[in-house]
Amino acid sequence: MSRIHVSGAAMLAATVTTLCLSMGAQASSHREAPFITNFPKLDGTDLYAFRSYETGRDGYVTFLANYYPFQDPYGGPNYFALDDTGRYSFRIDNDGDAIEDLVYIFQFDNRLPNANSGLKVPVGASQVAVPLKNIGPVGAGNTAALNSRETFKVLLKTGSNQATQAVVNAADGSATFTKPVDFIGTKTFGSVAGYEAYARQYVYDVTIPNCSRPGRVFVGQRNEPFQINLGKVFDLVNLVPVEAGAVPGLPGIEQSPANDVLANKNVTTLALEVHSSCLKGAGNGVIGAWTTASTRQVQVLSSKAQSSRPAVSGGAPVQVSRLGMPLVNEVVIGLPDKDRFNRSAPKDDARFLTYVTNPTLPFLLDALFRAPVNSVLEPDVANLAPSNLPRNDLVAAFLTGFAGVNQLARVTPSEMLRLNTTIAPTPLEQQQSMGVLSGDLAGFPNGRRPGDDVTDIELRVAMGRLCHPLTINNAPVDLGLCRPADAPVGTVPFTDGAPTHATDFDAAFPYFRTPIPGSADFPAFVSE
């Protein structure tokens, strides 16, 4: 075999990136641990926290948590209601002790209309319950044909021993909110625009306890926002994951929306917008956030199940899902500890420290692929993995944040998404998808916006990008965490070819776009 005389670092980056994807990423946090696969309704897939960049919302922070992965739009007749025995939470630490100071708890109630007996139609002399979610068109202000009522409450808990207080509708003081039914199809809702108008009537202005500024709440189905090229990765890595043209002699992969295999999936979004003054406490304006889902410790199935009571749940709530930074439980935490991580809290993350300081994935990649890579390179490369052990660069990225950017006033190493609420948001059209790596300090890992390409960012960081200077405000910045010589592949543009941009999303709350309809077309004569 002839040996290729190209940049060894570039070729190695391609190989490393490919294998990182093939061995770990199943979207950001979809089915990431063995036990959570039993509870898809409680499976948190992605968390976002960012300064709101919607016009007129200066000073606000938006939290978006996605649950219930891999929703096929046509997945009727029951579609994707959330778990009414579960608790879904946004947890916020504003003093740096890795313990939540604010907890926003979402609880759901799923019922049928007519005292839970459902809609009925006359069949002969009998009134018979129908099997479908709706029996006619549905739209904004027109929900009589819906055979489903999914509502929720939002409770705020402050401190560890405080009682919860209700977040209420600013318009009428009600503590009960409606979750729109999923996008059944365009015949039910008339059009994509018809569904969006229906869903947006359930974006609520809310009054938040102990907060002088009103917030907003929405829960509903959205198009899956996480973009990744999964299909080719799992087909024995059927791609070259370096940007096309970046490396002479290497074809690379073209950036294309067609590479996003999740584009035709939906997800359920919990969206909350709170003014920053009600979040940051007495700290330095940096907050840490994570989302969790819990369910009751015991469930007893009823042999005489009814719609309102198919099972009896009891015992204390047990956390089964946890998510802060993306991709942590997928490619950092070892398989024996994945379920343990989902049950744990940031304050106890010292037990997982070795997975960050001494990551196994780079070691395995070097052991498995150094010889094949060197068979086509000249000169040979001594090691594919970054050599700076312990990996203090990864500790900063995942566990402490960076001083002056997203580090809380008190530093407690722990895994969470950190956001500096004092850094102004970058307007949508000016946002850089590579976030801080490209000098956009309002982007990941300073929080996470919808348009931040976290797959590419984390792949580059894992292979040593932080060992090389970053360009901030047109000047090189050396973080001093490691040396360029420690990471010879650290400056290569890794990519999976599925680009993410801020303009792929809406410019207003809840930012994620209309879900894909279960049925897109119907004969014209049907509606005449």
Image (cartoon, rainbow, N blue to C red):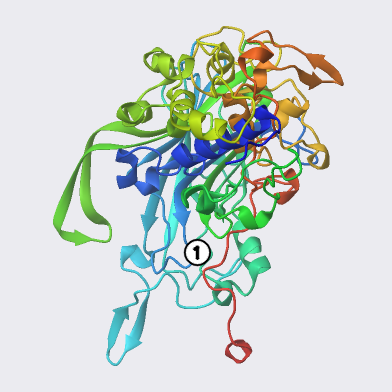
Please tell me how crowded label 1 is: few (under 14), some (14-19), or many (20+) other residues with Cα within 10 Å.
many
Q: Is 460 on the left-hand or right-hand side of 268?
A: right
- The amino acid sitting under disc 1 is Pro
Instruction: Evaluate whether residue 428 shows in this view.
Output: yes
| In front of the other: 515 or 501 | 501
Q: What residue is shown with label 1?
A: 73
Position of the N terminus, as image quadrant, is top right
Q: Residue furthest front?
A: 1
Residue depicted at x 41% and y 47% = 108
Q: Position of residue 155 (x, y in %)?
A: 47, 34
Residue depicted at x 49% and y 30% = 371
Instruction: Evaluate whether residue 165 shows in this view.
Output: no
Q: Position of residue 323 (x, y in %)?
A: 47, 32
Q: Is 470 on the left-hand or right-hand side of 416?
A: right
Kind of element beneath mark 1: loop
Q: Position of residue 137 (x, y in %)?
A: 54, 76
Q: Is 70 on the left-hand or right-hand side of 212?
A: left
What is the count of numbered marks?
1
Residue depicted at x 46% and y 45% = 67
Q: Is residue 66 above or below residue 13?
A: below
Q: Residue furthest left?
A: 303
Rendered image quadrant of residue 216: top right
Residue depicted at x 72% and y 26% = 437
Q: Residue furthest right?
A: 474
Rendered image quadrant of residue 495: top right
Q: Position of residue 461 (x, y in %)?
A: 61, 25
Position of the C terminus, as image quadrant, is bottom right
